[in-house]
Image (spheres, helix red, strand yellow):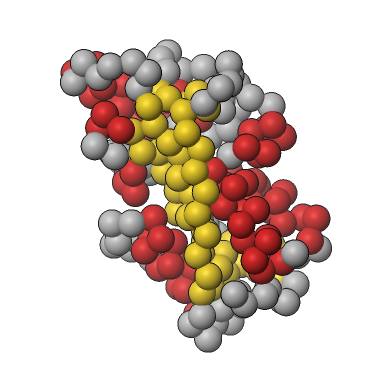
Amino acid sequence: MRRLTERRLVIATHNAGKLREIAELLNPFGIETVSAGQLGLDEPAETEETFAGNARIKAHHAARQTGLPALSDDSGIVVDALDGAPGVHTADWAETPSGRDFPMAMKKVWDLLEERQAPFPRTARFVCTLCLAWPDGHDEIFEGNVEGQIVWPMRGTRGFGFDPVFLPEGESETFGEMDPQRKHAMSHRARAFAAMVAACLA
């Protein structure tokens, strides 16, 4: 495992919610973060069918363009009764001509579960794969999962993406209802991040 010794890191995302969560997680380590969006970098095509594959595309793209180490996050929700969908296509399910519409995407997931008469609980997991890449082409991969189920109707206005319909295992609040600090402590992103910290920062 390669240690991260640089103090400036590009977060390879144009998603403000992801940037905020990752910046908060990195803050205790004194690492300055700047996003690909803030630097005006273009978004590479995510052509892989795995979270790790797409995370690698994004991190290496940002590292090559900036000459700085870059951290990318490819994450999504995997619904068992939908054969793992939306999975790596989670954000695509929310795409509309006028931007991403996650309430529409959440309704689509629920409607498909209803159509299939999926049994309860409608199990699902959030998956997060982090790729830490350096300009010389080296990278490290870390994954975190959180198990739970899809619930309806949507609950809560906190978080982002599919948070309002995801009830983590053993909890009474969805990620959309949960206090952000509590969510950050148990989320798929936090678990992947803990693995990265242990390997590259601690």
Residue drawn at 48 percent across, 82 percent down: 137
Residue at the far bottom: name it. 136
The C terminus: image quadrant: bottom right
Q: Is residue 41 visible?
A: no
Across and down, in percent, residue 80 comes to 30, 33
Answer with left or right where residue 134 lies relative to residue 44. right
Across and down, in percent, residue 142 comes to 52, 59
Residue drawn at 51 percent across, 74 percent down: 139
Residue drawn at 68 percent across, 73 percent down: 4
Answer with left or right where residue 185 lies relative to residue 90. right
Across and down, in percent, residue 104 comes to 35, 27
The tally of labels here is 0
Q: Nearer the viewer, residue 182 or 58?
A: 182
Q: Nearer the viewer, residue 198 or 53?
A: 198
- Vertical placement of 15 versus 122: above or below? below
Residue drawn at 71 percent across, 71 percent down: 8
- Vertical placement of 29 versus 116: above or below? below
Answer with left or right where residue 109 lies relative to residue 135. left
The N terminus: image quadrant: bottom right
Answer with left or right where residue 79 lies relative to residue 40. left
Across and down, in percent, residue 100 comes to 40, 39
- Vertical placement of 142 versus 8: above or below? above
Residue at the far top: name it. 153
- Vertical placement of 47 versus 1: above or below? above
Q: Is residue 109 visible?
A: yes
